[in-house]
Amino acid sequence: MATKTVAEVMTAPALLAARDETLSGAAARMAERGVGSVVVVEAGRPVGILTERDVLRAAAAGADPGTTTVERWMTADPECLDTEASIDDAWRQLGERGYRHIPVVAGEEFKGIVSMRDLVTLAQLRPAGEPAIVAPPGLKGVVVAETALGDVRGSEGFYHYRQYAAPELAATRSFEDVWHLVLDGELPTPAERAAFAAEIGPARHLPPEVHEILPALARSTTPMDGLRTALSQLAGTLELRPSLDVDRDALRADALRLSAAAPTIIAALHRLRLGLDPIAPRDGLGHAAGYLYMLDGEEPAPERARAVEQYLILALDHGFNASTFTSRVVTSTGADLGAAVVAAVGALSGPLHGGAIHRSLDTLDAIGSAGRADAWVRDAVTRGATIMGFGHPVYRTADPRSLMLRTVAERLGGDRVALAVEVEAAVERTLAELKPGRELHTNIEWYAAVVLETCGLPRDLFTPTFVSTRIVGWCAQAIEQATDNRIIRPSARYTGPPPPQPVPEP
């Protein structure tokens, strides 16, 4: 069967808007029509597109939707697809460019719009025998679910939790406030903040059954492996029930227990590895301060606790990354929340995900001093070597998490921070000279490693510390999945020998 063309699957007529229409007016019409974009058309040609993500970005930037115009936030002169393009062409262009909606033209005349949702729906309804749509490697750009928890806009260097820009939350709020936002949908009032703290406090203490296994884990495994096993033991001890069999309140309670206990487990494993006794959680300390206290037994300096807290906020959630997707896949089977979290820990442990934070420090170790930065970087770029802590599969601009963490690191100060800043500058200078046009910026790992080291954390705790905050995001994602669940069961395109073939005689 012939592959369909874009003209056969596009939405036509599409919803249009004028340049001077307000964002609130355009958003209201999008909601009424149930679509995710409006197109500005002049003289029959598309001159701009405004998506629901643009409206959300404007709100995060403080724009007044009642007075701000579509023209201010639309993408001008958008890329388009021809009506005769195949749906495979559309899939590739949407995936490679990170778009969700793209106008369709015949010549330059606007005809309609095609969205990622259109293509996903078509794939689900594809008759038996029709050639499969070619999925991009790693499912890049494929929309697998809808979420109200947040989004990453890589081409713009922007990401958010709910309706708030994540770096702004890190600059102004506590970890517990952001935890409440992600889990319950709103930033807490003072009364809600106190109630939330009262829920978290008891959950930080570990059951005896978990304490009993920690010494053996500390002796025989890394902190990361020990954390994964201890979380599994905790889930079993708490007798967490399948998500299919419980309501949201029960899942929320399970989420608090798992998320609150993780720092306690990490700190206990660390101290046991050093031959020291674990330190019990101390009531009255915030999440980050309490974690640092359990590591060394001293209440941390406020600036140290705040630096770690801001890292935890920035790393709490980040779109449908591999571990987050894993948590939702496991939850889609109806499994308990502990199973989803443990599976996600396994996914995050890989060096292509969260298991390589400490490797950024290996680069700084190899360079040694600011005076050697340019020569080292030039040699690495010339050889095509990977510079750990640089580059990201989503961001095509500076990683907003790295930008924020650089300010945190500079606030802490020290020679290590100064070296990290100089190496970043050297990389950008060298690329501009040797590979003009190549965009390569620091990712979260570069300054996260510097901040965590400056705050006294050993390298083998970097990834477990990352897990301790990402668990909050995984749990929120899992609860959202369970609320309106369909088992995640994609298809694969078979590429082996043509079947059926006769089975040879033994």
Image: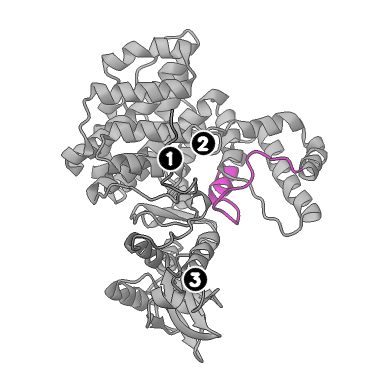
Residue 386 sits inside the magenta stretch? yes
- 271 on left or right of 66: right
Question: Residue 382: image x %, image y %?
Answer: 80, 44
Label 1 to label 2: alpha-carbon separation: 9 Å
Looking at the image, which residue is at 40% across and 44% down? Answer: 325
Which of these two is toward me, 360 or 7? 7
Residue 333 locus on image (x, y percent): 27, 41
The residue located at (25%, 45%) in the rendering is 482
Mark 2 — residue?
A: 354
Q: Secondary structure at mark 2?
A: loop
Q: Nearer the viewer, mark 3 or mark 2?
A: 3
CA gap, disc 1 to disc 3? 32 Å
Front-lying residue, 208 or 310: 208
Amino acid at dot 3: Ser
Point out the stretch of residues depicted in magenta.
384-407
Q: Residue at the spot x=43%, y=80% of the render?
A: 112
Residue 1 lies in what quarter of the image?
bottom left
Residue 437 lies, in percent from the top left, at: 72, 59
As drawn, the label of residue 86 is 3
Q: Badge 3, how many Cα within 10 Å: few under 14, some, many 20+?
A: some
Res. 414 in view? no
Residue at the far bottom in the pictured view? 43
For marks 1 and 3, give the one nearer the viewer. Answer: 3
